[in-house]
């Protein structure tokens, strides 16, 4: 039996306005979702062209969850997005050409060609790069929240983790500390129903991952991760609750991982019918339909946005391809952050 609150879908445009988004914001959200998917689709092409060293990870199916949460973050908030959360980088303002440069190991990628394709983040935008997602970044996010508390800053940390990673000890330790200290943090579980080839019934015995929140002393919420507006509304509530001293929330976004664990995995173990069912709930199609019905998105507007995104990504690819590979002589530079690197509004 579910313990966590199961969030309702968002209905009307009025309800969305109450949650703080106007029509322009909504079109921006749609655009960010298209860019997110477009970046990863082009990433596949680069991979097939042999231009991406190592494997290649995407978050197809997670665009609404990642963009929805990031849209609800404040400018000074921080987060630790994972390999399924490209939408967070895009929404916080990372330029797509830098992501393509990262994919190809080029000098202009956020890690300057020093780490794998999803191990990246721009600290200037309040994002902290993942070292692993199992779930090594949750203690880091909790540390940020503790620092905000000690410094009495009205800021919130967002810590992402997968449902498989929730079985590991660092999740328990992070939630225990955050709960006991009522820290300003939101734990976001990207529940895509698979941990590599392990299905959820072998990962946890509760109905929802968010059911555990109550035992840590805070609220658990499950939301349909393909519904960007519902994700946004619940993330906004949780973030503002944390900011005003109400403590953590565990927000679980339920989706299906629509591709293999990474490009080397064809996901043969996922029942076909599962893919078919979740394809009917594609986050971008769903939001497009909602915009047409509720916000008068016209054919012209839709076409214009699609064209803009296409142009942006084509230009981004061109610019990334022109970026050089890193100079082997610089290999040891930039491995450790300098005091200047950490002189951001987020580290002061
Ligand atoms: C300690 C450790 N064990 C195993 C792995 C290999 N591994 C990487 S991701 C992953 C599955 C994670 O599943 P989940 O937390 O649900 O995240 P998802 O990939 O589904 O988003 C595994 C087993 C690892 N990186 N580190
Ligand atoms: Mg998973």
Image: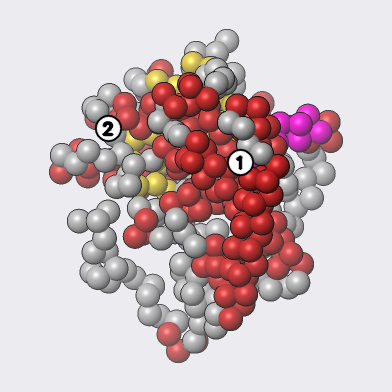
SS at mark 2?
Answer: helix
Q: Which residue is mark 1?
A: 62
Front residue (pair 66, 262)? 66
Q: Residue 86: where, in percent of width, then height? A: 55, 51
Residue depicted at x 49% and y 16%: 5
Does residue 139 appear in the picture of this structure? no
Crowd class of label 2 (few under 14; some 14 to 19; many from 20; radius 10 Å):
many
Mark 2 lies on residue? 243
Q: Secondary structure at mark 1?
A: loop
Work out whether residue 275 can be spotted: yes
Residue found farthest to the bottom:
329
Q: Is residue 160 above or below residue 45?
A: above
Q: Residue at x 54, y 62 (%)?
A: 96
Residue appearing at x 65%, y 27% in the figure: 293
The magenta region covers: 276-284
Q: Residues within 10 Å of mark 1 (few under 14, many from 20)?
A: many
**Residue in the image at 51% along x and 67% along y:** 98
């Amino acid at each position: 039996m579910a313990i966590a609150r199961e969030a309702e879908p968002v209905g009307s445009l009025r309800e969305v306005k109450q949650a703080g988004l106007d029509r322009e914001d909504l079109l921006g959200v749609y655009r960010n979702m298209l860019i997110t998917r477009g970046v990863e689709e082009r990433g596949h092409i680069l991979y097939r062209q042999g231009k991406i060293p190592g494997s290649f990870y995407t978050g197809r199916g997670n665009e609404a969850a990642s963009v929805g949460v990031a849209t609800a973050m404040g400018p000074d908030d921080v987060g630790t997005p994972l390999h399924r959360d490209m939408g967070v980088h895009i929404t916080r303002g990372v330029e797509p050409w830098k992501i393509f440069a990262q994919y190809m190991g080029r000098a202009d990628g956020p890690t300057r060609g020093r780490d794998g394709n999803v191990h990246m983040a721009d600290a200037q935008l309040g994002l902290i790069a993942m070292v692993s997602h199992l779930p090594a970044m949750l203690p880091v996010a909790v540390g940020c929240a503790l620092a905000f508390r000690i410094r009495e800053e009205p800021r919130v940390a967002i810590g992402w983790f997968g449902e498989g990673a929730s079985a590991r000890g660092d999740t328990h330790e992070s939630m225990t500390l955050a709960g006991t200290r009522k820290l300003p943090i939101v734990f976001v579980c990207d529940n895509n129903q698979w941990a590599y080839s392990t299905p959820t019934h072998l990962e946890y015995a509760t109905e929802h991952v968010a059911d555990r929140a109550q035992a840590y002393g805070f609220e658990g919420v499950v939301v349909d991760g393909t519904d960007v507006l519902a994700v946004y509304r619940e993330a906004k509530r949780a973030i503002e609750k944390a900011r005003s001293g109400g403590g953590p929330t565990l927000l679980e976004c339920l989706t299906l991982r629509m591709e293999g664990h990474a490009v080397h995995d064809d996901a043969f173990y996922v029942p076909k019918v599962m893919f078919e069912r979740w394809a009917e709930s594609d986050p971008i199609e769903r939001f497009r339909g909602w915009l047409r019905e509720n916000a008068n998105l016209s054919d012209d507007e839709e076409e214009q946005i699609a064209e803009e995104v296409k142009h942006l990504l084509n230009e981004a690819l061109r610019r990334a391809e022109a970026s050089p590979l890193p100079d082997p002589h610089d290999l040891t530079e930039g491995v450790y952050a300098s005091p200047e690197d950490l002189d951001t509004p987020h580290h002061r």
